[in-house]
Each structure stands twice: as C-alpha cells, then as structure tokens.
Image (cartoon, rainbow, N blue to C red):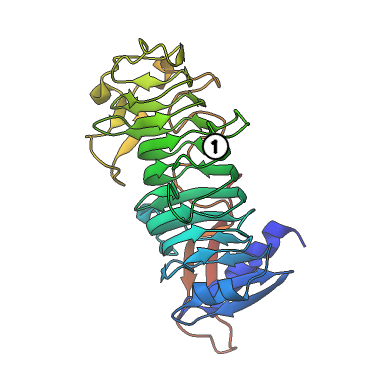
Amino acid sequence: MNKILLTTLILISFTITSFAQKQVILQSDGEYTIFSSSDAFEDAYNAAEDGDTIYLPGLQYSSPSNIEKSITVYGTGYHPDHTEATGRTRISGFRFRDGSSGSHFEGMYVSGTIQFAGDLIEDVTLKRLHVNGDIKFNRISSDPCTECNNIIIRECVFDEFNGGYSDITNLNLFNNITERIEYIDNSNGVNNNVAWIANNIIIRSWAPIYHINNALIENNIIIGGISNCHSNAFKNNVFDEDPTSNEENTWTDNYVDVDEEELFSDYPGGSYSYDNNYSLDDPGSYQGNTGNQVGIYGGLIPFKENTRPSNPQILSKEIESSTDEDGNLGVEIEVEAQDE
C-alpha cells in the first residue's frame, strides 16, 4: 500500500478510536500498536526497533532521556494557530546518543535542550521543531560528541545552536530562526566540509555568529554582528552593520548597514514570538544566490508558513457525539500532506 495512503488511514482510524483519549502510535513493518499510558511516548520508544515510526498526537509527553535507536517521530506541529484541530505536540528535551544515527524528529514543541553526545552520530534530521532551549553538541566533558556527520536542522526555531567544537562534518543549518550559532570548528578533523549555514534569521544584541570557523555562511539575515570567526565564506547575507573589513573571512555580495526596522514586515524586535512576521518588506531588494530572497522564505527549502510536519495532518474534524439508529458514527475529517 502507498506509504502516504497507509499513514492517512492510520491517522483517521486513530482519530476515530481516540475521540475520548488521544494515544501514541508505533508503526512497525506495516503494523501499528497504540500506547495510552501516562508515559506513552517512552513506552512506544522502548517497544520500537530501528527503522520504526512513532506518531505523537497533540498532547504533552515525557521524552526518553536518551535516543539510542534509529527512529522517526512525527508530531502534529508546534504553532498554536495551525494545530487547532489536533492540538500541538509538546515533548521534553532529550539526547541523541550512539545508535540514534538515521533518526528523524519533526513537528513538535520541545521544552528543553536537544543534545548530541556519543562516539558516532550521523544522518539525523530535526525538522519544524520549536525548541524552547538550545540545540547543542556536548563540549569539553566526560561525554562529548566525538564524531557527528550529516546533521540536518531545518525550518526550526531554537534559542541557540552550540557546536561545542565537536568533530562535526557536513552540518546543515537551513531556514531556521535562532538567537545565536556558535562554536563550530572542525580544526582537529581532516574534512573541510564543516558547516553550511543558509537562509537563517539570526538575531541577538551581540554576536549572533560567534566562534565559527571553516563554514559556508550564505543568504542569512544576521542582526548583531559577528565575533571570533575565521576562514568562513560569507555570501549574500544581510547585516545590520558592516563586518566585511575583517580579512580573516571572505565576503561576497553581502548587504551591509541595513536598518532592521525597515527589513521585516512586522517584527518589533526581541525574541521569537508567534505574533511576529519575519517576511521581508521588500524581498526583491535582498536576493540570495539561489535566485530568491535571503532569510527563511528563500533558499532551496523555504520555511513553510503553517509550520506543519510533512506527514498527513488533520486540518479539521467533526465527529458526532453518538451513533445513529443503525449504529453508524458520523465523521468528517479534512487531511492534508505537504510536499516536503
């Protein structure tokens, strides 16, 4: 059966059976199991095997402290204005460790920090998450992230990203909103493909780009300047000041001394808010090297305005409170899946 069709049927069946109580689904080898305890996410994780998928409805869940399996986890989304029919999925912070390579987390609000710590973690994707905390690789400690490869963080909102000077190769930060990206440097490694930082909005009162070396940084909006950065290629970024006199980096087609108040359609300043509008007031004046605007709504994978995850999601539902005389229950559900 087509994967999207199967997922949609599971979603609808799940909605009908869980009208009184929402539950967590574990999908494994075409079969699915429902967990409904107070620790349903943790129970589903404990029962999961590598390659399995977990679906989290719009409720609050405790997360497993450590992710040590290769799993996919979908929530309903994090934005309160775009999850009216389902509620938003809220989970606690967690840590990726050895064994988590290949994991994919999407469409949820994370209250706390997401960490990476272990000998080898690769091919992990974080997508459309709102992290009320930091995403970080353990720094100088007894439990560092020794080798981290092919990590993708896209269309997310988080406080800070801290690379911890871990041995990172091919880190991809695309179309995110954050206050700071810092401590990315693979000077001890042999691979120069350290980080690609593209189409993000990075706003902080001082040095939102801090201690980053050997990275490609392009098509971003960077408000607050840079500090302690070396051997980076800055291309087509928007700055509220002019950092291009720094000869320790290379500079190509950047926009400098841009007034922040005239840049966005409706952004009063400060930290991220659901009420802010990060669209550019004049996107045609700030073009990136991908043929569209800089910032989160440009690039190769533009930020989705509704922030919903890419698996099928319920947009609206009407379920009768009782069956008719023939025992039928009236159900009307609108389901939509995005392209990505």
Q: Where residue 35 sits in the image (x, y, percent)?
A: 55, 79
Q: Residue at x 37, y 13 (%)?
A: 246
The amino acid pointed to by label 1 is Asn
Relative to the observer, which residue lies in front, 24 or 151?
151
Residue 97 found in image quarter: bottom right
In the foreground, 158 or 16:
158
The answer to whether residue 267 is seen in the rendering is yes
Residue corresponding to mark 1: 172
Which quarter of the image is occupied by the N terminus? bottom right
Residue at screen point 28% across, 44% down: 275
Can you give x and y, in whole percent of width and height, for residue 104 in the image? 58, 54
On the image, which quarter does residue 294 sit in?
top left
Q: Quadrant of the C terminus?
A: top right
Position of 294 relative to 103 (above/below): above
Q: Is residue 331 left or right of residue 157?
A: right
Tag 1 secondary structure: strand
Vertical placement of residue 194 versus 312, above or below: above
The crowding category of the residue bearing disc 1, from other C-alpha atoms within 10 Å (few below 14, some 14 to 19, many at least 20), is some
Q: Is residue 186 left or right of residue 85?
A: right
Q: Is residue 246 above or below residue 162?
A: above
Q: Position of residue 86 (x, y in %)?
A: 45, 64
